[in-house]
Image (cartoon, grey):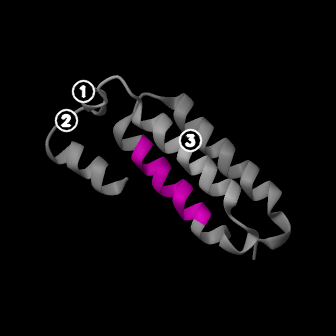
Amino acid sequence: MDRLSGYLADNNLDVENIENGSNIYTLFQVNIQELVKGSDSSEIKNTLNLYSAFLQFTLKCYPGKHKYVNEILKDAANYCARNESSID
């Protein structure tokens, strides 16, 4: 995600110009949700790092989409709540 957002920024490209009818945010969101469903409580740090990378990507590529940011933060908060007993 970092490489893609960096490429877009370095080449002054807008993410919406390369989407070609599909939404990259939605593609990442669906796949991240599937990964998180399959993760266990021992992978909390990695899962939160994934949410962080996704949030950074979204902020770079979709700066005006506050809804996307809120969705990511909500998903991360729900994940933490489900795994609260395992958090160091």
Helix, strand or loop status at disc 2: loop
Which label's residue is closer to the chain start, 3 or 1?
1
Q: Quadrant of the C terminus?
A: bottom right
The amino acid type, in three-letter code, at marker 1 is Asn
Nearer to us in this view, 77 or 44 = 44
Which residue lies under the disc numbered 2?
13
Whole-angstrom CA distance, mark 2 to mark 3, is 24 Å
Helix, strand or loop status at disc 1: helix
Which residue lies under the disc numbered 1?
17
Q: Is residue 69 above or below residue 16?
A: below
Q: Mark 2 and 3 residues: CB-CB less than 8 Å, in contact?
A: no
Numbered mark located on residue 62 in the image:
none
Which residue lies under the disc numbered 3?
30
The amino acid type, in three-letter code, at marker 3 is Val
Segment colored magenta: 47-58
Q: Residue at x 21, y 49 (%)?
A: 7
Nearer to us in this view, 26 or 77 = 26
Q: Is residue 62 above or below residue 5?
A: above
- 29 relative to 18 in the view: left or right: right
Q: Of helix, strand and loop, which mostly describes the magenta segment? A: helix
Q: Position of residue 11 (x, y in %)?
A: 13, 42
